Image (cartoon, helix red, strand yellow):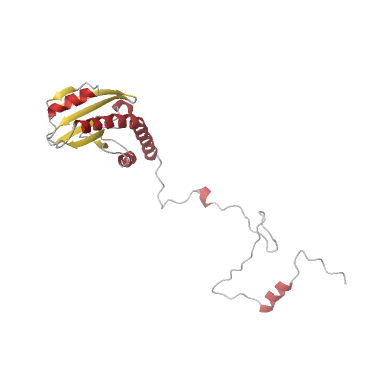
Amino acid sequence: MAAIGAEAIPPILSARGWVPRSIDAKTWRCTVPTGAGNVRVIVRHAGTWLYLAVIPFLEPESVKPWGAGKYPARFLGRILAVNSNLSMVKFALDEDGDLTLRVELPTESLSAREVDTALGLLATTTEQYRAPIRDALLDAGRAAERVSVLPEAPPLSEPPSDTESSPGPDISMGVGDAETSLGEPVIAVSNPSLDEPEEGPPALDAAARKAPLRSDPPPPDA
């Protein structure tokens, strides 16, 4: 099959009911009405390749101040993720930094049916993705603006505020208390100095273990 020539492109566009307008001898533009608004399709025959694109993919007025090469990084990451789910058509940035949806086809052994399939995918993909992608861009833009207005963190060398340095309420308990105010059992752990041994004979500790608890009944009168 011979390579498809530039003269074959306008009849393919017209067969879809589109009205091709010539930009130059090998480039045509069509404005196609869809459920997502008008879609501007550009077709250029460049010898060995045929380029088809929706330019721009998003209406500039609907995404201000974004566009023309200014996009949040989070949004561009999502566009790459969307590309992995598309067949034949892919999102890209044009030379002006605008988001486009495009197809590149080798003209060698290219049939009119394949060109028509690519044109149909450009229109249906735009109709399906234009609103979600516009909303994703605006959401990513708002998120980027929120991050940019957050106050800077204080330096690490800054002393804590009075509120942070003030001691909390005294919740220490006496040795004889069995429970905290929350009902949790308290285990008293001694912490003697590592330099000086605890004073007092060992018998004192043994006597303390034999001492009656507060809950024991008082001894009978002698």
Q: Quadrant of the C terminus?
A: bottom right
Count up the numbered dots: 0
Question: x, y percentage for residue 113?
Answer: 22, 31
Judge whether 203 appears above or below 63 on screen. below
**Image side of residue 122 versus residue 9, left or right:** right
Residue 54 picture location, percent across and down: 25, 30
Residue pictured at 19% horizontal, 30% vertical: 112
Residue closest to the eye, 34 or 213: 34
Rendered position, 205 above or below 1? below
Identify the image quadrant of residue 51.
Answer: top left
> Which residue in the rendered view is the most extreme toward the right?
222
Q: Position of residue 173 (x, y in %)?
A: 66, 59
Say which residue appears at 30% left-offset and 40% top-offset.
83
Instruction: Judge whether 95 appears above or below 187 on screen.
Output: above
Q: Quadrant of residue 34?
A: top left
In the displayed image of the protein, which residue is found farthest to the front? Answer: 1
| Left or right of 121, for residue 174 | right
Q: List x then y, in percent, for residue 48.
A: 13, 37
Q: Nearer the viewer, residue 142 or 28?
A: 28
